[in-house]
Image (cartoon, rainbow, N blue to C red):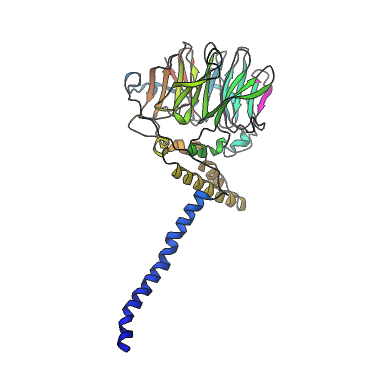
């Protein structure tokens, strides 16, 4: 009997080791798996449902896209005095733009800056973006009235002489049961109607990283009717609706679909009225505000541009919807923890982290700073490109041709770039 018991000791010792190892590794394996399943399937977390997207084979950089460094010849105006001049417009040779601090400003002789109007409270810090307001698209009508969109507040027009403000549409008003959460660019017709983009009906600008990770068609084009003072939906189902440009005859509207790297064409009149088709696709970057070149063609900036040898984050993650959902919810959980900590012990540092973690500018900073704009004709054919391979001018949101110069805006740069033609 004693011998049999002794013979069993190695077996029992081995069994005890296996049990011990099991107890050690069980939580190591199950806790991450539980967290993973919770991030993906929990109904109490962020509502994000990414769609799979496969980018096209990049265009070759030949012909009008042949590599160049034309943008390196630009000069930088107002460097370190402004931040985020998204849209640039001129009236009577005076330059206007909207800034990250919520103000629309005017420049005289490219030197003196004069504040025109803000919708927010200037006492707030930049991380309180929705309280500061964020003017994005700007346009003048023929009478000199300035129309603009504020990402958080709505559509407005202002008399730049008296500085009196008129509200045309407030973002708090739902359209087809949905709020406009990122009002972006616009254009004004000769009749006073305004076409403007709502980039997302799901996430605000301060949460735009979720919109990027979802890559869904949450955007739309809205139309403000000047006669009836009403706003309706013109086009639905656009993956981050962005730049807007009426054709010279106002018979169609060009629309930047930023997350699909293409320009859409929506017919306003004629036999195709109401139809939407692709005007130009497979761009070498993500298009932003479209503007006329005054010769029947258009300037299209690529806010996130990349040469064929580099893939953007969107192209790399596009096919992997599951991964993007986990990333989105991880950001959401991290941000929620930071918000709770800030509630317990308010600190500016924590507020900065809360602001940056889900803002689009954080994602942009991870991308290549390759700068690029393209010029296209009325048929959607690329006829010229201006590039900055080393990022001397990058993250361009608009090209405004005025006189013999081009002016380049950006949502994040601390300057306006100017290039002589």
Q: Is residue 164 magenta?
A: yes
* Quadrant of the snapshot with the C terminus: top left
Q: Residue at x 52, y 15 (%)?
A: 272
Residue 275 is situated, as x and y percent measured from the top left of the image, at: 53, 20
Considering only vertical position in the picture, is 36 above or below 65? below
Looking at the picture, tell me which residue is in the foreground, 71 or 65.
Answer: 65
Return the x and y of residue 377 as percentages of the image width and height: 43, 14
**Is any atom of residue 248 visible in this view?**
yes
In depth, the one of 249 and 85 nearer the eye is 249
What's drawn in magenta, residue-wise?
158-185
Left/right placement of residue 39 relative to residue 55 reads right
In the rendered image, the vertical position of residue 245 relative to residue 331, given as above or below: above
Residue depicted at 42% across the width and 24% down the height: 281
Tell me where residue 174 sits by quadrant.
Answer: top right
Q: Position of residue 200 (x, y in %)?
A: 56, 33
Q: Is residue 177 above or below residue 399?
A: below
Identify the residue at image location x=55%, y=51%: 337
Regarding residue 115, the answer to whether it shows in the image is: no
Pick the front one: 7 or 225: 7
Residue 76 on the magenta span:
no
């Amino acid at each position: 009997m004693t011998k049999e018991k002794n013979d069993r000791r190695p077996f029992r010792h081995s069994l005890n080791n296996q049990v011990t190892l099991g107890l050690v590794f069980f939580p190591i394996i199950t806790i991450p798996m539980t967290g993973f399943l919770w991030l993906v399937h929990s109904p109490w977390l962020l509502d994000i449902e990414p769609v799979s997207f496969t980018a096209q084979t990049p265009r070759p950089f030949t012909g009008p896209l042949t590599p160049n460094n034309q943008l390196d010849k630009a000069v930088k105006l107002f460097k370190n005095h402004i931040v985020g001049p998204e849209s640039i417009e001129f009236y009577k040779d005076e330059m206007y733009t909207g800034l990250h601090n919520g103000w629309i400003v005017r420049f005289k002789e490219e030197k003196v800056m004069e504040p025109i109007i803000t919708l927010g409270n200037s006492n707030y810090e930049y991380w309180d973006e929705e309280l500061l307001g964020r003017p994005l698209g700007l346009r003048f009508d023929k009478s000199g009235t300035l129309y603009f969109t504020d990402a958080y507040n709505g559509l407005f027009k202002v008399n730049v002489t008296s500085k009196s403000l008129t509200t045309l549409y407030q973002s708090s008003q739902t359209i087809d049961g949905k709020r406009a959460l990122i009002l972006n660019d616009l254009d004004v017709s000769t009749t006073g109607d305004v076409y403007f983009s709502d980039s997302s009906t799901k996430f605000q600008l301060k949460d735009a990283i979720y919109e990027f990770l979802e890559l869904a068609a949450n955007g739309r084009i809205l139309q403000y009717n000047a006669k009836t003072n009403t706003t309706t939906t013109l086009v639905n189902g656009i993956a981050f609706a962005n730049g807007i440009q009426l054709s010279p005859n106002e018979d169609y509207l060009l629309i930047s679909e930023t997350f699909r790297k293409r320009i859409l064409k929506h017919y306003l009149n004629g036999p195709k009225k109401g139809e939407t088709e692709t005007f130009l696709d497979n761009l070498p970057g993500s298009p932003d505000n479209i503007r006329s070149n005054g010769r029947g063609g258009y300037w299209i900036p690529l806010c996130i541009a990349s040469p064929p040898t580099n893939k953007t984050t969107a192209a790399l993650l596009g096919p992997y919807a599951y991964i993007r959902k986990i990333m989105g919810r991880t950001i959401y959980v991290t941000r929620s923890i930071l918000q709770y900590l800030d509630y317990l012990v308010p600190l500016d540092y924590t507020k900065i982290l809360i602001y940056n973690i889900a803002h689009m500018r954080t994602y942009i900073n991870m991308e290549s700073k390759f700068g690029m704009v393209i010029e296209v004709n009325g048929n959607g054919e690329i006829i010229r490109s201006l590039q900055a391979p080393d990022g001397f001018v990058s993250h361009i949101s608009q090209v405004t041709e005025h006189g013999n110069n081009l002016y380049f805006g950006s949502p994040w740069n601390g300057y306006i770039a100017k290039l002589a033609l």
